Image (tube, rainbow, N blue to C red):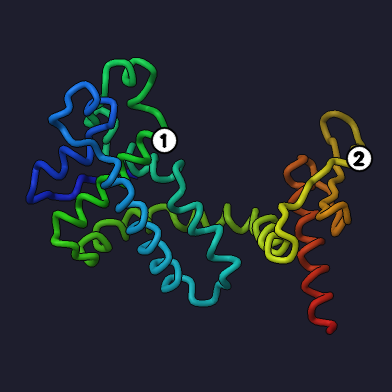
Amino acid sequence: MTGQLPRFQSPALLQQALTHKSYSNEFPKFAHNERLEFLGDAILTFLCGDFLYKRYPAKSEGELTPLRAALVDAKQLAEFARSLNLGPQIRMSRGVEGSGGRTNLRLLSSAFEALIGAYFLDNDSDIEAVRAYITPLFESVVEQLAASAHQVNYKSRFQEWALANFGEIPEYTIIGQSGPDHARQFTAAVAVQGRVYGKGQGRRKQDAEKEAAKVALLKVISSQRSY
């Protein structure tokens, strides 16, 4: 995935988007990008939701929510930043740079959010200009993320159910394992408030937990429908 920086009418806005707070601390006359980051985060969340809503008309809220989270989380935004080669362009203090700032996931993702916020302002708050820029980036990764999101969907949805009904996050426990080292089989249980809602098996602990979440979610859905 490769990309190009959007074209700015105001070089000052682009410069601010690529200025880390540590640089402003050393050179106070230069504004840093934290406010732009705040704005860009809100814009990205909205445009991502709109993009997914239109692209996947058959997907439920429970399916779209984890996909939206994956598309605008720090890891993915940092990947967008790398595709634009933002790291070498960010102004930061020598101390931050020396500690790996130019490859830091959080710093890169924040710079990308600031870039989007700045581009929005540079276009007189025209959301369509930002949409035209960000949509190809979303398109370049959404199918891969959709496949991954589908794998963790049951855990995400069961967590949503647990939070909505009990205000608690489910607890996963590995309750058994069997088989030789090269073909280990794990058994996981998922509980809420001490009550086990599902058990599952898998070659990896994570897979066993996902299967347990699937069993639990289908169980509570079936129970709700029976009333």
**Along the viewing direction, whichever of 183 and 57 lies nearer the viewer:** 57
Which picture quadrant has residue 28? top left
Q: Is residue 226 left or right of residue 35?
A: right
Q: Is residue 102 left or right of residue 119?
A: right
User: Distance from label 2 to label 1 (Cα)?
Assistant: 37 Å
Q: Is residue 173 left or right of residue 65?
A: right
Q: Which residue shows up at 25% across the image and 28% down it?
A: 88
State the image coordinates of residue 121 (x, y, percent, origin top left). Answer: 17, 56
Would you place residue 15 above or below residue 193 in this image? above
- Dot 2: what SS? strand
State the image coordinates of residue 8 (x, y, percent, origin top left). Answer: 12, 49
Residue type, numbered disc 1: Arg
Q: Is residue 62 left or right of residue 186?
A: left
The disc placed on residue 106 is 1
Q: In the image as oriented, which residue stretches furthest toward the bottom?
A: 227
* 10 Å crowding of disc 2: few (<14), some (14-19), many (20+): few
* 10 Å crowding of disc 1: few (<14), some (14-19), many (20+): some
Q: Which residue shows up at 84% across the image and 46% down it?
A: 188
Would you place residue 177 above or below residue 66 in this image? above
**Along the viewing direction, whichever of 152 and 226 lies nearer the viewer:** 226
Q: Earlier in the sequence, mark 2 or mark 1?
A: 1
User: Considering the image in quadrants, where does the C terminus appear?
Assistant: bottom right
Would you place residue 20 above or below residue 11 in this image? above
State the image coordinates of residue 74 (x, y, percent, origin top left). Answer: 44, 43
Which picture quadrant has residue 125? bottom left
